[in-house]
Image (cartoon, rainbow, N blue to C red):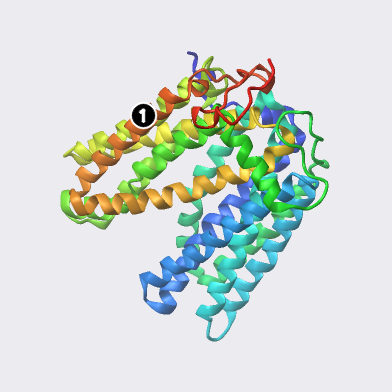
Amino acid sequence: MKLGKLVVDVTPLRVSRDFRWLFAARVVSLLSVGLIGATVAMQMYSLTGSSLNVGLVSACLAVPMVVGLLVGGVLADRHDRRILMVATRGAYVIVVAGFLANALAPQPQVAAMYSLAAIAGLVNGLSVPPLMAAMPAVVGRELVVAAAGLTAVTTQLGAVVGPAMAGVIVSTGGFASSYTVILAGAVLVPLLLARVRALPVASGNGEGSAAPKRLDPLRSLADAFRFIVCRQLIAGLLLVDLAATMFAMPHALFPELGARRFGGDATIVGWLYAAPAAGALIGAVASGWTGRVNRPGAALIGAVLLWGVGMIGAGASAGLAATLTLLAVAGFGQSSSEILRRGLLQVHTPDELQGRVGSLWAMQAISGPAVGNVNAGLLSRVFPAGGALVAGGLLCVAGTVAVATSLPALRRATFGRPAESDAGDAPPFVMASTPSRPA
């Protein structure tokens, strides 16, 4: 394959004016998210001296975000998605201004930080589904995989650059300076999003469930869940990701691995955390192949297996260089699988369900790693850190093989239009109660 076909496909940036505005807004937004996450954690520790409080303020961000994702998914399938994006990111400006005001107070309040973190999580959750749902309409279904690759690049850059920027700004100018930079970015995002054209929801066309005329959030979410359960491919996309995140998340093991295997140097622990992200960034930059692969479903399964095998190798390796390399290889697989999974999900989901299905996908993407790190901690009670990493990787491989074997629609999935999908592809566990779709 030529080098040009390996590099991330920038066609969406070239051909879609609206995607360029969305991409610019996403870059600024993710840098701000990386900045504020690190800044809030550092300020909370400076006020309390407690890592528990740092963990609790992170939970205040995560739990309301799940609620926001559910509500945002319903709203994104009923209202103009541009309006929702501008409104939610505009509300975020007020939240950041609150953090800045608290930092400038003579005695910053811990309770205020908890409250603002909860509101920030809710607002961020509301903003995700309309952005995800807008992509097929903005770039066309034929370019959603390329758009997913560009999205993955911004995600990894935000995760690496944002916290690093926060450390520099806080060390030189203090917390208020960091919140000022974040506020400037928060103001810019809705201005960029306002340049996108109107994005009304398409009416139902017989595939999936059309948006209900009256507001019934529980019924709307039930429609989306039914769509996921009754499609082998969509169910498989979520299950294969859970096999990776619930069984083979390594982050909880890195401090012990660094302390017991590599001498306890905090710098080495930092390298362990950075290695998967570095591999993921390489995978995102070199994602041009993902939109050209003939069998993306099979490629997705291979990418998830690469994550699991990388974790097995990293856990079994005795040398630092080999461990870091294998963690980076696993990160490459994770990034590739995310791009393929996002592309398949958006291609095979009707427009009137994009918001709700996207919100459930995002919920799983948040909760899976959280559960996975708990599972890793439990495994470390039975095995040393390296052994727990090997065990998690083996469970990931076994779970992935089980999903791929039981759901053939996932193995043979393509980026063809939904109408080209196999008829009657309900998973075995709902086949008896779900009639086959007409050919």
Q: Identify the amino acid type marked 1.
A: Leu
Residue placed most toward the observer, 284 or 123: 123
Q: Classify mark 1: residues with Cα within 10 Å, few (<14), some (14-19) or many (20+).
A: many
Could you say whether the residue bearing mark 1 is in a helix, strand or loop?
A: helix
Find residue 242 and report its horizontal and vertical position in percent.
44, 40
**Quadrant assignment for the C terminus:** top right
Q: Is residue 409 toward the left or the right of residue 86 in the image?
A: left
Find residue 409 and report its horizontal and vertical position in percent.
53, 21
Residue 415 falls in image quadrant: top right
Residue drawn at point x = 41 percent, y = 23 percent: 405
Residue drawn at point x = 39 percent, y = 30 percent: 400
Q: Name the residue under label 1.
A: 306
Q: In this view, does 263 lie above or below 398?
A: below
Q: Is residue 234 above or below residue 255?
A: above
Q: Is residue 398 toward the left or the right of residue 363 in the image?
A: left
Find residue 10 and report its horizontal and vertical position in percent.
62, 28
Residue placed most toward the observer, 10 or 429: 429
Q: Is residue 112 above or below residue 75?
A: below
Find residue 54 and report its horizontal and vertical position in percent.
42, 68
On the question of residue 22 being in view, the answer is: yes
